[in-house]
Amino acid sequence: MDAKPVKASHLILPGERVQVEYELPYAPTLYGENITLDIVFEDDYLIVVNKPAGLIVHPGAGNATGTLVNALIYHCEHLSNDNGLLSPGIVHRLDKDTSGLLISAKDNRVHSNMRSQFSKRTIEKYYYALVWGQFADDQGAIDAPIGRSPRNRKKFTVIDSGRASLTRFEVLERFEFLTLIRVKLETGRTHQIRVHMTHTNHPVFGDPYYGGRNSKIITLNMRNRQLAAKLLAMLNRQALHARRLVFTHPMTEKVMDLKAPLPADLEAVLTVLRAESQF
């Protein structure tokens, strides 16, 4: 302030000159990397990949390389830049440890159209999730606002001041202490399925962030504790997979109905559960 440092509590007076120094946001140089992509669909306008668990979508502090964006830059001749310098082509996101379908755009016109479809909620988004506990009904809906947690700003929670969020689910398979469900997202909030499932006391199996790992084991009998521990050792992430996307192609106007099979780790867990159900 007038070439002198001041405390944050200083009240600025008329005529005082203010000088602020700050560090620019982290901005790595992006380059392509030859990372294998499981391509479900590709043409001159779009590329839809089946993202494996563990793959981060775009670079940021601490992960400048090895991301889906690096793989897309290497594979695609051009990508949209509507979503900022660090996220070329990225129309929507999946959490690092969520697998499944993800759409990227190759030019800004296509990007704008796809973003509009997401915002208008005309895209159908279906997930498979293995969650703790049993459901009384075969289907249902969770309508509860989601916002950032006041206790942990890196997490989200159901909170009155949050944004409207609607998750529909249908039971596919029932096991003794777990249930496989199909989820349809009507909104697209950060961590929506994980937050809503935890809110209803059915956290996603394996989710270390929202109570889906060891905290649930203590509620089981000894036999099921051992089985749950075995399954958690097989799955080093949340049991959540973006299974299906239905949308209108932005150029051809054809209805696209794309699916991604369950990954090997989730199939292995289900195989064990089905075998145990025979006893």
Image (cartoon, rainbow, N blue to C red):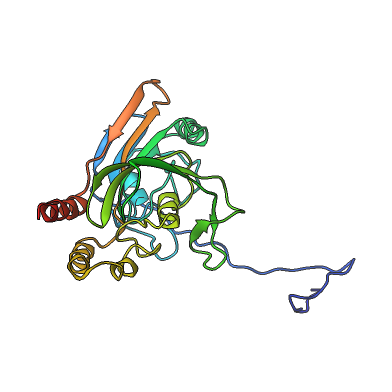
Compared to 186, does 45 lie above or below? above
Quarter of the N terminus within the rendering:
bottom right
| x and y, in percent, of residue 65 in the image | 35, 59
- Residue 15 versus residue 57: which sits nearer the camera? 57
Left or right, residue 167 beside residue 206: right
Q: Residue at x 78, y 68 (%)?
A: 18
Left or right, residue 155 beside residue 126: right
Q: Residue at x 31, y 68 (%)?
A: 219
Q: Residue at x 66, y 69 (%)?
A: 21
Does any portion of residue 49 appear in the rendered image?
A: yes
- Residue 104 versus residue 177: which sits nearer the camera? 177
| x and y, in percent, of residue 253 in the image | 40, 20
| x and y, in percent, of residue 140 in the image | 40, 41
The residue at the far front in this view is: 136
Left or right, residue 141 beside residue 279: right
* Residue 229 figure quarter: bottom left
